Amino acid sequence: MDALSEILRGLRLDGVEYGRCQPSAPWAAAHPQDEAARFHFLAAGSAHLQTPEGDWISLSPGDAVLLPRGDAHVLASEPGLAPVPIADFPKRKVCDGIIDLECPNRDRTNMLFFAVMRFNVDRQHPLLQLMPSVMRTSDLASSEPAIPPLLEAMMREAEMKRVGAGGILARLADVLTATIIRTWVEHGCGQAGGWLAAVRNPDIGRVLAAIHLEPARDWSVAELARLMGASRSGFAQRFADIVGETPARYVARTRMQQAHQWLREGRRVGLVANELGYDSEASFSRAFRKIIGAPPSHYRTKTSA
């Protein structure tokens, strides 16, 4: 497969919470920044979304938006309303993996579906960093005819309350997210440079795919050069010219991003150090701090608080 397919194969959803609400105007809900991606689908009625940059966009029935990095945003019946934090809305479990937001004065002519999606990588992953803060499916559907049927299937599962609906929704969300990302890469990102240009390069892309499929591996420059079929020095120079940093630096950043994710999941510092092949917590901590900017113990305390 091509490099992008390999990297998308490694990018998956580890958890999805799916819900719905039927708000009555006027309404506005503030969604704070979160490590999880956010997804909203307007099945009926009308809504407006304030992007992380502060712009307002109007949503029509059938529109869906993906915020791949979970950036802060507001959903409202109209721009300019004072938003209520989304955490303040009472929740009621419908079935496994699906909740209802209990909105005051429910309006059955409005129907919003939403999902909180947890990727197996954090928001610093190069692919997630490259994406826009908001991706709207109506902007991509003409290039990818599979998107509307996937949205309709998700809506039906959320409405029917059948046994296993949560699991089916999670799988549909996984497919839909990968489809949105692939379609954006193929059609929506223009003549992008940097990391995406590197992924599209047949030789360097193969190397990047290998690194991201095994992010904990301590890749040597010689191993990566063999993957590309080039000499060590020739590979290192070409990699730096296209990617913008040395292979060793890129591997180090990818490994520390994996460590960062493991720490977020609650793994002990010593276990993470061992998984990455470090002889001691001290040597791992020095490497982590150099890349991430804070020691793992500080981050672990922050995460556990």
Image (cartoon, rainbow, N blue to C red):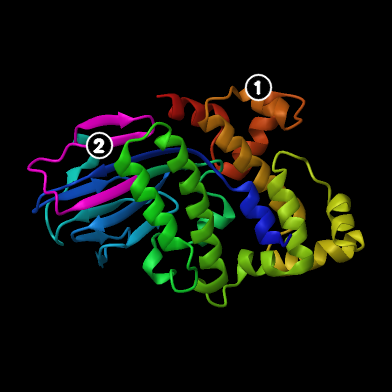
Residue 122 position, x and y percent, is: 52, 44
Estimate how packed mark 2 is, as few (under 14), some (14 to 19) or many (20 or more) residues with alpha carbons within 10 Å. many
Is residue 102 located in the magenta-colored stretch of the structure?
yes
- The residue at the point 54 percent across, 55 percent down is 178
Residue that numbered label 2 is attached to: 100
Amino acid at the residue labelled 2:
Asp
Q: In which quarter of the image is the C terminus?
A: top left
Which residue is the site of mark 1?
270
Q: Is 16 on the left or on the right of 200, as rendered?
A: left
Question: Which marked residue is nearer to the observer: mark 2 or mark 1?
Answer: 2
Q: Which amino acid does label 1 sit on?
A: Gly
Position of 111 relative to 89 (above/below): below
Q: In the image, residue 174 lies at what x, y percent?
A: 51, 47
Q: Residue at x 39, y 49 (%)?
A: 154
Quarter-wise, where is residue 258 in the image? top right
* Element carrying mark 2: strand
Residue that extends furthest to the bottom in the rendered view of this protein: 191
Residue 286 highlighted magenta (yes or no): no
In space, the residues marked 2 and 1 are separated at their CA atoms by 40 Å
* Residue 64 percent across, percent down from the top left: 35, 59
Question: Residue 105 occupies which quadrant of the picture?
Answer: top left
Instruction: Name the foreground residue: 71 vs 292.
Output: 71
Pointer 2 or 1: first along the chain? 2
Helix, strand or loop under label 1: helix
Judging depth in this view, the residue of 292 and 219 nearest the camera is: 219
Magenta residues span 89-114
The N terminus: image quadrant: bottom right
| Picture quadrant where residue 4 is located | bottom right
Q: Residues within 10 Å of mark 1 (few under 14, many from 20)?
A: some
User: Is residue 304 positioned above or below 40 on the image?
Assistant: above
Judge from the rendering whether residue 212 lies leftward or rightward of residue 173; answer left or right: right
Q: Looking at the picture, how far across and down is residue 26, in whole percent?
A: 8, 53
